[in-house]
Amino acid sequence: MSSHYSSRIAVSLLLASSALMAEGFSVTEYISVTKSVPNYSTIQEEIPSERCYDVQEKVSSGGSNNDVVGAVVGGALGGVLGHNVGGGTGKTVATVGGAVLGTLAGQNIGSKYNTPESSSYQTVRKCENISTMKTRQVLSGYTNYGILKGQEISVESDQPLKQIPVRITYSY
């Protein structure tokens, strides 16, 4: 026998004895992908915005204060007239009384000449912050399918695959 032929026999016997002693072994096989299906996730986003609108608001312009002016003028005139009536302590009482009566009379007369309060409207812009929810679908990966020994298997990945690596263990 040649030495080349005998070394082949020795290697074969060595491998066979190793396999018998190991009680099993594993190999990696590659299965062709039959289809890749995209997977989607639902995401909700809050979108802030501003909504503005115009409203009519009442603006009042105050009437004139003729009753106040009338009270002051009437009080002064009543005090002067009362001061000219009487003498001694009666003069003081007449002055105070004339001022009080003049104030009341002047206020009453002034209120008759007051112009009523006038109202007008102006357009005012009002704004408020609002949020709307938006739902959208985003690609989250792929499910890759293949057939191994008559059964369909699947593997998730972030991209479509051409082959699926499968580790097969043989035991005896």
Image (spheres, rainbow, N blue to C red):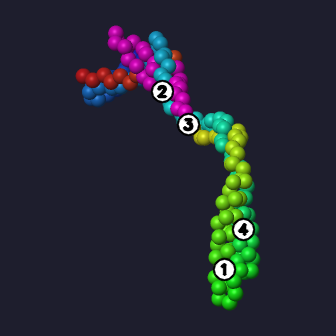
**Amino acid on which disc 4 is placed:** Gly
Which of the two labelled residues, at mark 1 and mark 4, occupies the earlier sequence position? 4
**What SS does tag 1 mark?**
helix
Q: Are marks 4 and 3 in contact (CB under 8 Å)?
A: no
Residue mark closest to the camera, 1 vs 2 = 1
- Measured in 3D between alpha carbons, the distance from the residue under mark 3 to the one under mark 2, in whole angstroms, is 22 Å
Front residue (pair 145, 165):
145
For disc 3, the marked residue is 131
Q: Is residue 47 magenta?
A: no
Answer whether residue 142 is magenta in the image: yes
- Mark 3 lies on a secondary structure that is strand
How far from the left and from the top, in percent, is residue 108?
Answer: 66, 60
The front one of 54 and 69 is 69
Instruction: Identify which residue is drawn at 70% across, 64% down.
Output: 106
Give the labeled residue for mark 1.
94
Question: How many C-alpha atoms fall within 10 Å of the one at disc 2: few (<14), some, or many (≥20)?
Answer: few
